[in-house]
Every structure is written in structure tokens, then in C-alpha cells.
Amino acid sequence: MMKGYEIISALSNHLSENDIIVSSNGNISREAYNLLPKPQVYLRGSMGLPIPVGLGLALANPNKRITVITGDGNFLMGLGSATTAAFYKPKNLKILILDNLKYYTTGGQKTVSSVIDYVKFLESLCIEYKCSKRASQDEIEQDLSEFINSEVFSVLHLTIKEGKKDLMNIPDQPEEITEKMILRLTKLA
Amino acid sequence: MIDPSEFITFLEKKFQYICGVPCSYFKEFLAHLASHGTETQLKHVYATREDEAIGIASGVAFSGKKALVYMQNSGIGNIGDALTSLAQLYKLPMLILISYRGLEPDNDFPEHSIMGEVNEPVLKAFKVPYWNLSEDRWTIEMKAAIQKMTETSSPVVLLVKKGVLCQ
């Protein structure tokens, strides 16, 4: 089984100029900042809100591809947003759930994620592209490629192993993160 | 009541999206929006929670566009983190319409009485500038709120009492 930062690192092989990443607070944002092309939307707080932020970006930028990276604790806190996103199902919105069954950033306390059968849950939302599996080194490139290149609203749920890399904190102030993103999204293509 | 059609015409010049959780105080306004959805430039997004609506408006603001958010004042209890660690922290402008329930003692709706009392102190504590929206002076109040939102690149609130956007 892979660790979260290994998956985020592998994701960089599949991104182009056209991709915007929304990363969720804690380790995931730090990993996205250090391992993916910059700038992206790095959330520092607002637990439970990366999917709504991604949905707003996807609706406002139909020609960009928006990928939300969230952990299981964050996903569960904003579970209603899975239904909102599935209701609007923008084809340029992708949700990647990295599930270690823990609030890992705060010290590895348990979440209740293990009760969910993600295949059935995503099936019930009528999401056209959904996949739930253990993240494995042999299959990750193909899994990420299928997920991100599907022409429909997509959700990929990966069970991962805990583990983090020593990475620097995000040096950009939140205001700078906003300024860089607005510049990126409003400049003439 | 403010004419819903005039109100929406005013809004669509300043905002591209509208998102929120309803209150009966917005009944006529939201009904007009629903029945004239194809004519208006405002794209409507339904939210499951008030903090989700702030999140969606934040995604719109990260794109250099603007969203209007609406909610009942009970939702103030749900948006603290969305304001302080997202919309305010990242300087994301948005206009939030909040119905002002529980203003007067109302034995039928005790669920609004405490929030009615603490509504304004809570907004002050969160350092969110707010105005009251009135039937007579609504364009002036809207313009003042939008000017502050633009100058500070941050969320601002308009409080909406009974009868202003509903009959």
C-alpha cells in the first residue's frame, strides 16, 4: 500500500497547465505545495470545505480541470458536499480521497471512515466515474490517468498507508495564494 | 417588499453566482429567481449547509468572480470557521444576505430567539461589516456593502428583516 505523499507525487505526472489543484488543510496542502507544480489553491483551515471550494472553481472555470485532494476526516466533515457536487456533476471536477482511516495531521486519531463501503456510497450518488481501491505502486499511474482523464465528474477513493515526509511549511500567506490564483485564472490564455 | 425583479436585475450586474440555504424571509425573492432562472445571468447553486455555501462562493472568488450567499441567521452558527479560516483569511470578497429572525419575542419560533439576540454581537465579534437592508433605501445600502466588499476584498453582510424580501 502507498503513502499519501507518494500518490500526490505520482499525480504530478498527469498534470498540465490546465490543471488546478485544491488541497485540504494539514499534511495534504503541504505535500501538494512541495510536490506539485505551483501555484495551486492550498487550504490551511476550513476543514470540510475543499469540495465546495473545488465546486465553485469548477463551475466558474469550465475550461480548467479542477482536482480536489482530501483526506478521509476532511471528506467526512463535509459529507453533504459530496451530494452537492454529485448533483451538479461538473465534468471538469475530480475528487481524490486519500483514506488512511485517521486524522493523521493531528496525531493519528481514528476517523469513522471504515464503516463506509465507498463503492456502494459513490454508486448511490450516480457518479459516472468512481473507483475505490487500495493504492498500489503497480497500478497507481493507470488509476490516476483514468481518473483524471475521464470526461465526467469523477471520484477516486484510495486506501493508503500512514506516513509523511519532512516538508517545509507553505511560505505563501493566504492572501498571496489568492492573488496568484486569480492572476492564473484571469490572465488571457 | 422590494420588487424581486428589480432586486435581481441589480444583483446580476455585480454577481455571477448565487448560492445558499433558504429562509422563508427570502420566499418571494427565491421564487422569482426559480421561475426566471433562464432569463437571469445569475447562476444558482443550492447548498446543503451554510458553510458549504461560503466554500462555493470562495471557489468562485478564487477565480476572480463574485458570488452572493444567502442564509437564515441560524446559519451564522455554522459559518464561523468558513469565514475566519477561509473567506476572511484568504481575502475572498462575497456578499452574504442573512435573514434577521428572532428580533421580537415570538412564542411560535423559540428556536430563533437566542440567535436573534446575539446576531449582531456575533457578526461584530467575527469582524464582519454589516448593514440592514430596507425596502426604501435598499440600493444605497447594497451599494455601500458592495463598496466595502470590493475595497477590503472580504465578506460583508446584509441583514434582511421580515417583509423586505418576502410578503
Image (spheres, rainbow, N blue to C red):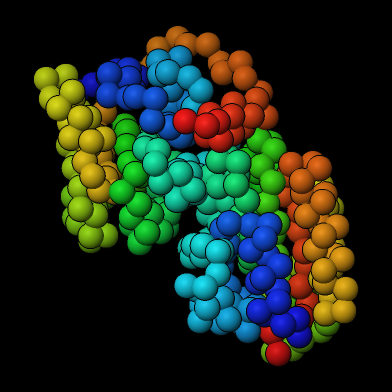
Is B44 rendered above or below residue A149? below
Residue B8 drawn at (x, y percent): 65, 71
**Picture quarter with the C terminus of chain B:** bottom right
Q: Is B167 placed above or below B95 here?
A: below
Query: In the displayed image of the protein, which residue is found farthest to the left?
Result: A138
Left or right relative to A81: residue B164:
right
Image spot of residue B72 (x, y percent): 66, 70
Residue sitting at x 78%, y 77% = B161
- For the image shown, how many numbered marks are present on the structure? 0
Name the quadrant containing residue A9: top left
Pick the front one: B14 or A45: B14
Name the quadrant containing residue A12. top left
Going by the image, does B140 lie left or right of A152?
right
Q: Nearer the viewer, residue B19 or B64?
A: B64
Rendering coords of residue B143 (x, y %): 82, 60
B94 left or right of A124?
A: right
Residue at 80% x, 63% y is: B142
- The structure residue drawn at horizontal position 76% and vertical position 58%, both measured from the top left corner, is B157
Q: Identify which residue is drawn at 68% across, 57% down.
A: B14
Asked whether residue B113 is in view, the answer is no
Q: Is residue A81 visible?
A: yes
Give the quarter of the image for residue A22: top left
Q: Is residue A31 above or below residue A61?
A: above
Q: Nearer the viewer, residue B61 or B79?
A: B61
